[in-house]
Image (cartoon, rainbow, N blue to C red):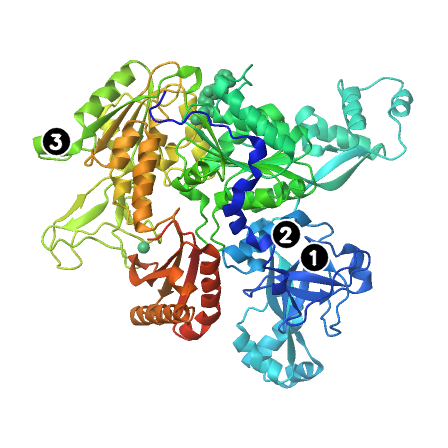
Amino acid sequence: MAPGFPKCDLLELTSIDECFSSINSMCQFLEGEDAGTAKANFEEGAEELSNKDFTCLRIAVNVPVDGTFYYAVPEDLRSGANVGCRVPVPFKNRKVMGYILERTGKTHNKELKEIRDVIDPEPLFPESLVPFLEWMARYYIHPIGQVIQSALPGGLNIKSYKTALLTQEGLCALDSLHSHSEQRKVLSWIKDHPDKGLPWTLQEVYGLQKKGWITIEDRLKKTSGGPLIRKFVRPKRGIDLGAVLSERGGTSKAKNEFQFLETVFNSHGILLSKLTDMFTNGSYLVEKWMGKGVLESYRDAVYRNPAGEIISPSPLPSKLYKQQELVSSHLKACIEKGSFFSCLLYGVTGSGKTEVYYRAAEHVITLGRQAIIMAPEISLAVYLEGIFRSRLGDRIAIYHSGLSQGERVDQWMRMVRGEVDLVIGARSALFSPLPGLGLIIVDEEHDSAYKQDRGPRYHARDAAVVRAKMEKALVILGSGTPSVQSYQNGICGKYHLLSMPERIEKRPLPDVEVVDMKIMEDRRSKWEMISPRLKEALAQNLMSGNQSMLFLNRRGFYRVYLCRSCGQSIRCPNCDVALIYHLEENRLNCHYCGYYSKILTKCSSCGNEGLRAYGFGTEKLEYELRELFPEARIARMDADSTRKKGQAIRILKRFGGQEVDILVGTQMITKGYDFPNVTLVGVIAADLSLGFPDFRAGERTFQVLSQVSGRSGRGDQKGKVLIQTFNPDHYAIRTATAHDYQSFFREETQLREQLGYPPFSHLACLTLKGNNEKNTEEAARHLNQAIRGTLAKWPRRGKEIHVLGPTEAAISRLKGKYRWQILVKSKNVSLMRHLLTRVEQFKGKIFQSSGVSLILDMDPYHMI
Ligand code: ADP
Ligand code: ZN
C-alpha cells in the first residue's frame, strides 16, 4: 500500500446533508439573490405567472448586457413559445437573437415590445438547465445571452446581418443618377439583391438612408450545420409485399430480388446508401421497383455518426475488487437517494476507477435518469467512449469541440429529445441538455484543462458540482492526484472522500528513480537530453519487447536561437517570447500567436553572424531517439503531431496495438490511458513545470509526475520510472517519487495558507489589454485606483478584500497587445463578486476611447 493513504473512509449517508455549507455559498443565488435582474423591456418588473395563459416571456438576449428582459407574446405564437426556443427580438433599435428562459403572466407594462416569431419548433435546452445557465452568468460575470450562445453547439447559432431595401425615392434616384456614379452602383446592387447582406460598411451606405433612398434592416441567418439530409427508400403506402410477389408468380430475374424487397418492406424506410451497401445491384433494384410504383424515395434527416473507436477492447469484468465494491455500493446508495451528493474518488492510477464510473452510470440509467462523463481532453473522452459504447450500445453521445458543427448539432438534439442516456465529452459536455440528469462524473478532476480560457471563463469541475446540486444529482470527482482544493473539501467533509489506495490485483506502483542532472552535468561538458541511465533502461526495455513512454512538456526542436555576440534571442514581433525552431516545418514558430519566420543567419539586433540554437523539445527528443535506437519504432504525440482530426486516436491506437515501442509526448500522454505493456516511463525534465510563474506550479509538477508515472507497470510486469531533474530535493518531486500524496498535500497547504492562496481564499484576475503601451499602463493604474477607492468606501467589509498590483503580466505582450494585471484576493467570494460587478459597471468610464479592454477571470488558472 502506498504510504500515507487514508483508509477507505466512508461517511454515514444520513449525516451528510449538512456538509455542503460551502457549496451553498457558491449556490447562494438559489435562495436570495435573484429575479431582480430581470427588467421589463428595460424597466418594469413582471407579475407572478399564472401557468395557463402566460402573456410574456423572460428572455436572454445575445448581446453584451447584464440581466434578462421581458417581452410580450401575441396570442398566435403562444403555443410555440417554449422555454429553450430562440426568438428574434427588437432590442435598442436592433434585431437580436433571444432565448426564452421563462413563460410568465401578465405585466402592467403596456409598453412591452412583442416577439414576432419563434425560430425553433422544439426547445434547444430543457427548463431544468435555466437556473444553471443563470448561475454561470452571475458567478463568472458574463452576459447570460452569451453564456447560452457559447453553450449551444456552434452550428445552431444564428448570425445577424444588415440588408437594405430601395424606397420609392431611391428608385427615382436610380434613374436620375449618372451611370458611373458610385451611389448609382450601390442602389442598383440593392435593387438586384433583396435580402442579401450588404457588402459595404454601414458608414458607406448610411448616407443613402439619410437621403431617404434606402432603408437598412437587420436580418438573421443560420450558420452552416443544420441537419444532414439523406435519401431513403420505402414501400409505397397501401402496397403489400405478398401481393407484389404473387403477382410475379414467385419468379425473379435477379437472385437476391426477394431478399431485397423483404429488406425494404421490413424496414419502413431505409437509407439508400445502406441498401447499396447490402446489395451490389441495389441502385438498379431501387430504380426498377420505383418504376413499377412499388417503392418510393424520400429525404430525411440523419444523425452523423462521430462514434469513437475502441482503442483496446474492454470486456466487462466478472466481479469488482473489494475496494471497487466498497466505493460502488456507497455511490449506489447516493444514487438511490435521488438527491445531491458530491464525492471525491481518490484512487491511485490503475486502481480501476473506470469500472466504478461504469457501475455508477449504469445504475443511474437503470433508474431512468441520465449521466455525463467529462474528461479533460478530447482524445481521452473518445477513448472512454469506446469503452462505454462497447458495453452500453447506441444510447451514448460523444460531445466535444473536435466534432464538426453538424455532428455537434446532431448530438445535442439527440440529448434534448431524450434519445441519450450517457454523454461522454470534454469540458463543453457540462452543458448537455439532458432532461433528467442524475450523475456527473469529472474524471481527472485535478486537470487545469477544465478551466475555459475564453469567456465565459468557467471551471467545468466547479460548475459541475453546482449543476449537480441544482438538478439533485450525484457528482463524482475522480483522480489519482486530487487537486488541493478538492482534497481540502474532502477533508473538511464537504465532499465524501472515497479512496481506492491499491492498484488492481495489488499490482505494485512502479519504482521511481531520480536521476540528478546536476551531478550528470558536472561530469560531462555538454548537457544531454537522455542521461546514460535512461539510455540503458530504454535499451533494456526494447530488448525485452516492452513499451516505453518518454515525457517532455515542451514541443518543437530547439527552444531558442541566441546570438553569440550580443546574447539576444530571436523573438516574436507580436509577443514577448522567443521563437521556437520546428524541424518538420523547418522554421521558427511562435507558440502563442502562430507567427513564424524562416531561420535567420544574422542577429537582428547586432547584425553579427553566429546564431546558436539551445534547448530542446519533443521533436528533438524524437530525433535523438531515432539516432540512438535506429531499429526501434518511435511515435510522437503533441500539439504538432495531432493537429488534424483523428490523428491523436490513430497514434494511441498504434501504441495500444503494440506497433510502437517508444511513445514520446507532451502532457497529452500523461493522462488516463491504460496500456498494460508499458513498463518504462522516462521524464526528461521534471523541472519545467516548477519554473512556471504561478502559485500552482508545485501542485502541477506533483500531478504531472504522478500521472505520467502511473502509466508504467499497469499490466502483469512491474513498472519503472526514471525522473531526470535538477531539483531532486524539491518537495513536489520528492513526494511524487515516493507516491506520497499526503505529504505533498501537507506541505502544499501550509504554503498556501501562509500566502493566503486558494483553497484558503478566492482569486480573481483582471487583465488589461491594449495596442498602446502607455494607454494600457495608465488604464491599469486608473482601474487600480478606482477599485481601491470603492473598497475605501466599504469601511468594514472593504478590508476583507486584498488588491495586488497593477503589474505587467508575465507575458507582457501577446498577439501584439500590451498586458497588465491586477489580482484580487478574498476569503469572501460573494463580497468579491460584488466588487467585480461594480468594476464591470465603471470600467466603461475608465477605458473610454483608450483602446484598452478588460478581461475578468474568476478563479483564474492561467495567469501568465
Ligand atoms: P484508473 O482509471 O484507476 O487508472 P483503470 O480503470 O484504467 O484504472 O483500470 C486499470 C486496469 O484494471 C484496466 O485494464 C481495467 O480493465 C482493469 N480492471 C479494473 N477493474 C477490474 C476488475 N474488477 N476486474 C478485472 N480487471 C479490472
Ligand atoms: Zn507571437
- Residue 795: horizontal and vertical position, in percent? 41, 68
Q: Which residue is mark 1?
A: 102
Image vertical order of residue 771 relative to residue 457, above or below: below
Q: Residue at x 59, y 32 (%)?
A: 334
Q: Can I make out residue 84 in this image?
A: yes
* Horizontal relation, residue 25 to residue 126: left or right: left
- 7 or 463, which lies in front? 7
Q: Can I make out residue 310 in this image?
A: no
Q: Residue at x 53, y 43 (%)?
A: 20
Q: Amino acid at mark 1?
A: Glu
Q: Are the residues tagged 1 and 2 within 8 Å (C-beta)?
A: yes
Q: CA distance from mark 3 to mark 1?
A: 67 Å
Q: Residues within 10 Å of mark 1 (few under 14, many from 20)?
A: many
Q: Which residue is mark 3?
A: 519
The quarter of the picture where residue 606 lies is bottom left
Image vertical order of residue 20 relative to residue 91, above or below: above
* Horizontal relation, residue 283 to residue 332: left or right: right
- Residue 23: horizontal and vertical position, in percent? 52, 46
- 532 or 590, which lies in front? 532
Q: CA distance from mark 1 to mark 2?
A: 9 Å
Image vertical order of residue 100 relative to residue 276, above or below: below
Q: Are the residues tagged 3 and 2 within 8 Å (C-beta)?
A: no
- Residue 756: horizontal and vertical position, in percent? 34, 51
Q: CA distance from mark 3 to mark 2?
A: 59 Å
Q: Which residue is mark 2?
A: 130
Q: Residue at x 53, y 77 (%)?
A: 204
